[in-house]
Image: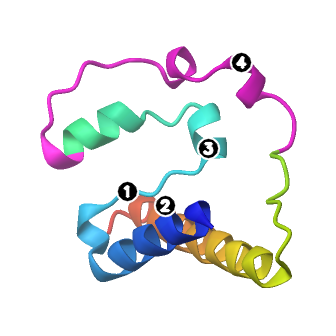
Amino acid sequence: RMWVAANALLLRHAEANPDTVQLVSFGRLLGGTPLIAMANERWDLGLDLVPTAAAVAPAYASGPPPPLLSGDGRLADRAESLWARLSSMEEAMWTREAAGA
C-alpha cells in the first residue's frame, strides 16, 4: 500500500510538473545513464559526479526485478497500472530528450 500511495503521488506530480522531474528507470541507471551529470546540467546543482555503479548494491544489479506482491488483487492491479504509467512517462521523457525537445 505504501508503494502504491507514494508512487501515485510521484506520478501525479510528474504529470502536473513535467519540467521539474526526471524519471529514470533502474535499468537505465544500470546501463550507465549519467544521472548526476544530467541533474547538474538541467538544474545547475553542482553535485559531485559519482558513477551510478558506486551507489548500487551488486545484488540489485543482477537478475530480473522481483514481482510486485500483494495479498489484495485490486492493490496489485493498481500497482501494475501505476508502474505502466510511470514507465510510459519515463520512456516519453527520454524520447523527447533524444529528439532535442
Q: What is the secondary structure assignment of the residue under circle 1? A: loop
Whether 16 is among the magenta residues is no
Q: CA distance from mark 2 to mark 4?
A: 25 Å
Asked whether, in this view, residue 12 is left or right of residue 42, the answer is: right
Side (left or right) of 7 relative to 28: left
Q: Type of residue at label 4?
A: Pro
Magenta span of residues: 42-64
Look at mark 2 in the image and give the residue it sits on.
94
Asked if labels 1 and 3 touch by Cβ distance under 8 angstroms, the answer is: no
Where residue 5 appears, as percent x and y from the top left, is: 52, 70
Residue located beneath label 3 in the image: 26
Instruction: Name which residue type carries label 3.
Output: Phe
Gap in Å between the C-alphas at discs 2 and 1? 9 Å
Query: In this view of the protein, which residue sits in the foreground, 94 or 74?
Result: 74
Look at the numbered disc 2 and give the secondary structure of its residue: helix
- Which dot, 2 or 4, sits closer to the camera? 4
The crowding category of the residue bearing disc 1, from other C-alpha atoms within 10 Å (few below 14, some 14 to 19, many at least 20), is some
For badge 2, the amino acid type reads Trp
Q: Rounded to the nearest whole Å, what is the CA distance between mark 3 and mark 1?
A: 13 Å
Q: Amino acid at mark 1?
A: Gln
Quick one: 52 or 98, which is closer to the camera?
52
Q: Secondary structure at mark 4?
A: helix
The residue sitting at 16% across, 47% down in the picture is 43
Q: Which quadrant is the N terminus positioned in? A: bottom right
Q: Residues within 10 Å of mark 3 (few under 14, many from 20)?
A: few
Res. 84 image quadrant: bottom right
Q: Position of residue 31 (x, y in %)?
A: 64, 34
Q: Residues within 10 Å of mark 4 (few under 14, many from 20)?
A: few
Q: Is residue 58 placed above or below 29 in the rendered structure?
A: above
